[in-house]
């Protein structure tokens, strides 16, 4: 099984047929993709299941400094 989604799967997920519109939908939802020479987006299952906005949200929760030493 391929890690890349097929064109039909990308069309079904984005609800768009045109590659430029698919790229816009993926960008708006912060899903990582790369374009081929023809401008068609290629998406992996990993990036679809783990969008970038969720990765940064989890990391920023635990990224607070410890001010306990100031007391």
Image (tube, grey):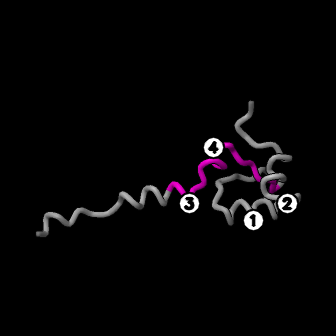
Q: Where does label 2 land, which residue?
A: 16
The image quarter in which residue 46 lies: top right
Residue closest to the eye, 26 or 33: 26
The image shows residue 6 at horizontal and vertical percentages of 81, 43
Q: Are marks 2 and 4 in contact (CB under 8 Å)?
A: no
The image shows residue 51 at horizontal and vertical percentages of 60, 54
Residue closest to the eye, 54 or 42: 54
- Drawn side of residue 35 relative to residue 53, left or right: right
Q: Is residue 62 above or below residue 70?
A: above
The image quarter in which residue 71 lies: bottom left
Q: Alpha-carbon distance for marks 3 and 2?
A: 22 Å
Which residue is the extreme one toward the right? 17
Residue closest to the eye, 68 or 1: 68
- Drawn side of residue 16 relative to residue 43, left or right: right
**Dot 2 crowding, Cα within 10 Å, few <14, some 14–19, many 20+:** some
Compare marks 1 and 3 and give the one earlier in the sequence. 1
Report the number of discs.
4
Residue 54 colored in magenta in the image:
yes
User: Magenta region: which residues?
Assistant: 39-55
Q: Which mark is residue 53?
A: 3
Q: Alpha-carbon distance for marks 1 and 3?
A: 16 Å
Label 3: element kind = helix
Q: Where does label 1 land, which residue?
A: 24
Q: Residue at x 46, y 56 (%)?
A: 58
- Drawn side of residue 59 relative to residue 4, left or right: left
């Amino acid at each position: 099984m391929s890690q890349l989604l097929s064109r039909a799967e990308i069309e079904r997920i984005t609800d768009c047929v045109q590659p430029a519109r698919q790229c816009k939908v993926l960008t708006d939802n912060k899903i990582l993709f790369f374009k081929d020479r023809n401008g068609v987006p290629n998406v992996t299952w990993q990036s679809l299941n783990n969008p970038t906005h969720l990765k940064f949200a989890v990391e920023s929760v635990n990224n607070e400094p410890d001010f306990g030493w100031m007391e």
